[in-house]
Amino acid sequence: MPFSRRWLMKFAAAAIGWASTLAGWFPFSKFASANMLKQAGSETQAKGTQAKGKMQTKTHVAVIGAGAFGGWTALYLLRHGARVTLVDPCGPGNARASSGGETRVIRGTYGPNQPYTKMAARATHLWKENERRWNLKLLHQIGVLWMVSAGKDNDHFERGSLPMLREAGIPYQELSVQEMASRWPQINLEAVHWGIYEPEGGFLTARVACQAVLDGFLAEGGEYQQLAVAMRDLDGGHWDGLSLSDGSKLQADQYVFACGPWLGKLFPETIGNRIRATRQEVFFFGTPAGDQRFSEAKLPVWADHRDKFMYGIPGSQGRGFKIADDTRGPEFDPTSGDRAVSAEGLKSVRDYIGFRFPALKDAPLLESRVCQYEDSPDNNFIIDHHPRYENVWLMGGGSGHGFKHGPAMGEIVAGLVLEHKDLDALFRLGRFGK
Ligand SMILES: Cc1cc2nc3c(=O)[nH]c(=O)nc-3n(C[C@H](O)[C@H](O)[C@H](O)COP(=O)(O)OP(=O)(O)OC[C@H]3O[C@@H](n4cnc5c(N)ncnc54)[C@H](O)[C@@H]3O)c2cc1C
């Protein structure tokens, strides 16, 4: 065949998607009046198949958004026996998506009393399982060093992380400053009191992994359309399928919306500003030629937790020494926001790098990016069905830490949608009250 399906989809996106995306992501055609939504509390079908007369047909699930959450969810829904259609106007890990860019940290250190350490352990297992299946390298276990600068009475986060790591079976070492100094003399450990080292933590490729998930999904029989769902208020219901940007309709038995920072626009009443996009700057610096001290071979991923939370990924597969400040930036429009970094942001990371990594004081800036976090009010993920429609599912609120959990989230949501599995109330919409 002269044109593959993917080529045709990309062509359609180029022809239709981009112009409309820039214009505010598509005008909306009218929804038909028939209501295909299932009111919450009504009977739903379970498992990947449903009875239709005497015939057994697969449950058809539409997943909207092919980022870290939607892509993995589509894949696990498929593996749980559903027919799955995934849609995204700009493709997996695109430059506007929160899952875009080069790399993401994977770690289990998450503070006390939270579900994320165990989730990270499960996700690590699934990343490795899928890497083997696809014969790809996505997870780079170069270790994570957590530098604890908080005083003795103020290190509850790190102290509370240790039993959680033990319980989740994530290996770690508790290190004194002396031990850290002898292992990583390239770090100035001034004001650091102790450290946690996770030898099996590290980094994941970001946009490359999102594409790998889509490729895996297609290879296993998933359907993908590079199109946008009309950005209209979907809270009101009374819609019979989703209007897509090429004028077609997508009808399914279940709908999973994983639209990252855009979720509040589609569901202004249920989500609205419960997901707030913040502007985050990321910098890549050039290390001295031939100097391995700042490469992934000699330095782990690091996190410096003090008044600010700074973190970095050495090497970043040739992109340079990545460094970012986790402090939440100002509100940001993920569609039209300007993605040039600020002079203040650059000065602040330069000052920091000169302090913590003195040999990189004058390192040249190679690249910079602006990405957005999509924060929920409590920084916990959102996974729930729509309060009025039990076949409409909302997932998001990655809050600057969602990427690593992609496969574990996919597994959880597939279990919820197809098998009515239980879910921690921490993720439910009910926690926000009315
Ligand atoms: C700078 C930065 C650093 C981070 N660091 C880490 C880290 O180190 N470790 C970690 O675990 N996490 C990290 N995160 C967080 C993590 O990347 C995000 O939580 C995660 O990628 C969110 O994925 P998502 O699928 O919810 O959203 P997205 O990736 O934004 O995906 C949403 C998708 O929905 C699509 N979409 C939107 N509207 C529509 C529509 N109308 N119709 C169809 N599709 C639509 C978009 O095109 C997009 O592809 C970081 C995030 C940023 C920005």
Image (tube, rainbow, N blue to C red):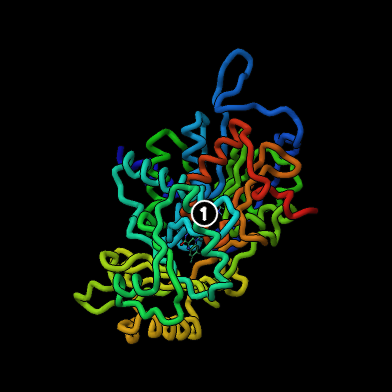
Which residue is drawn at the image coordinates 70% and 58% (left, top)? 272
Residue in the foreground of this view, choosing between 171 and 368: 171
Counting other residues with Cα less than 10 Å from the Cα at mark 1, is it few (<14), some (14-19), or many (20 or more)?
some
Residue most toward the top? 54
Which residue reaches farthest right? Answer: 434
The percent coordinates of residue 13 (x first, y second) are 47, 52
Left or right: residue 359 compared with residue 75: left
- In the shown orientation, is residue 171 left or right of residue 227? left
The residue located at (40%, 34%) in the rendering is 220
Any part of residue 134 in sight = yes
Q: Position of residue 273 (x, y in %)?
A: 69, 62
Q: Is residue 377 left or right of residue 136?
A: right
Could you say whether the residue bearing mark 1 is in a helix, strand or loop? helix
Q: Which residue is mark 1?
A: 163
* Residue 335, quarter of the rendered image: bottom right
* Residue type (three-letter) at the residue carrying disc 1: Pro
Depth check, front residue: 249 or 76: 76
Residue 359 sits above or below residue 182 on the image? below
- State the count of labels: 1
Closer-to-camera residue (190/374): 190
Residue 91 seen in the figure: no
Q: Residue at horizontal 39%, vertical 41%?
A: 216
